[in-house]
Amino acid sequence: MRAGIVVAALACIAQPAAAQAPAEPSEPPAEPAAAEPTPAPAPPAPAAPAPSTSTTSTTAVEPVAPAVHRFAPWQRTRLAIELELYTQARFVRRTGDDLSELRLDRGELGARIGLDTWAAATLRLEAIRSASDGGALGVDGNSTVIRVKAAHVAAKHDIASVQVEGALGFVPDPWLATLESDYTVKPLSRTGSERLLDWPASDLAFVGRATVGPVRFSLSAGNGEGLRYPERNTGKTTTGVLEVVPIATEALRVSIAAVGRDGSLGVASIRDRRAGGGIAVTSVRVRGGAEVVQAWGIGDRGDAKALLASAWADAHVVSRAFVALRGATLGFADDGGRLNTFGGAVAVEPWQDARRGRFRVWLAIDRVTSSGSAMPLPGADPGDATLIMLIASAIAPFTVD
């Protein structure tokens, strides 16, 4: 019985071959001509085309290009290293003696090690002058020293459609991190909040973040003293940032953010409060953004009130060539004066690789003016200056999956 089933199955499998050649006779035929040639089998009917390749419905079924990430995804690499360098030669025409100098504006080296698919440790170092700008009381005069800019452990967990992240240590400030994620003119100037409001780039803090679709909320609670000082009072500084990305495609991305900050600085608990918002637009050839922030308390002046407005843009005009504009103004309340800084630049990009980084050379001009209490020495030095800069910038990442 089993043998019969096997024979029948083999016969079914061999049936196409039998249609092309006559069955082998039990004995040799007496006359070859007696067996009529078997006609060639009819060609099989063409198979129905798959819907995705149909020539009559291409428009209806053509896949749409996937949208880009609304927010930077959690990195799953085992090791990520990044070197970021901005160096320049500049001439400063100012009140009093002019100045020409060579300087290193930013030198940073960072590493991120993936402890697992859900946890990582980050360490980032930066090179800075050991004394304040224009000062000489630093390490061995005013030497360039290396300090820790970021050092934290982070983890993430998905709860249904919500991605939750947390980090503890020297953590990047959530507001500056939001601005810099789309800010492409860092070689020309730091963001308005960091440069004019003295907003610390990172702080000893805990940062929590929740992302749901196009919305992300970040909350930071820390010392508020930034990188220069340890905690000097019992109060903590809290910063909240709400981001919404209503449009995120390969052709256009629009990001809107709002920020609120409340805290204190120093042993005198000088108030450090901020409220504002920003927008960034990124397209294939043009990118730009703006921020507006109201400040209560700046530096060691707890009574100061000021409004910051800052904007920037860059455009890819031709192959490997860019133009950029940026400007910021900080106006103090009650006719307390104003500080303005604005300028433009052209850049060429002789080398760029999506995985290995980029190198740009900039020729830039900047203008700085001030009045009232915004002057470096109110009533004596207006701080007006014109800067002409030749800048070389390089970003070189390296990853191990």
Image: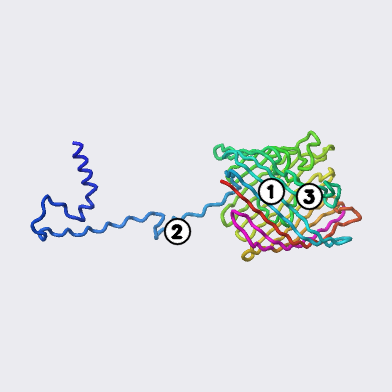
Residue 14: give x, y in percent of width and height: 23, 49
Q: Which residue is mark 3?
A: 144
Q: Name the residue rendered at 23%, 58% in the picture.
A: 42
Q: Is residue 129 left or right of residue 253?
A: right
Helix, strand or loop under label 3: strand
- Front position in the image: 166 or 358: 358
Helix, strand or loop under label 1: strand
Residue 231: give x, y in percent of width and height: 78, 36
- Residue 148 drawn in magenta: no
Furthest residue in direction right, as rendered: 380
Q: Name the residue rendered at 56%, 55% in the picture.
A: 250
- Residue 326 vs 221, above or below: the answer is below
Tell me, for residue 109, which label it has, or none.
1
Label 3 close to label 1 by CB (< 8 Å): no
Tell me, for residue 59, which label it has, or none.
2
Q: What amino acid is labelled 3 in the image? A: Thr
Lower sequence index among marks 2 and 1: 2
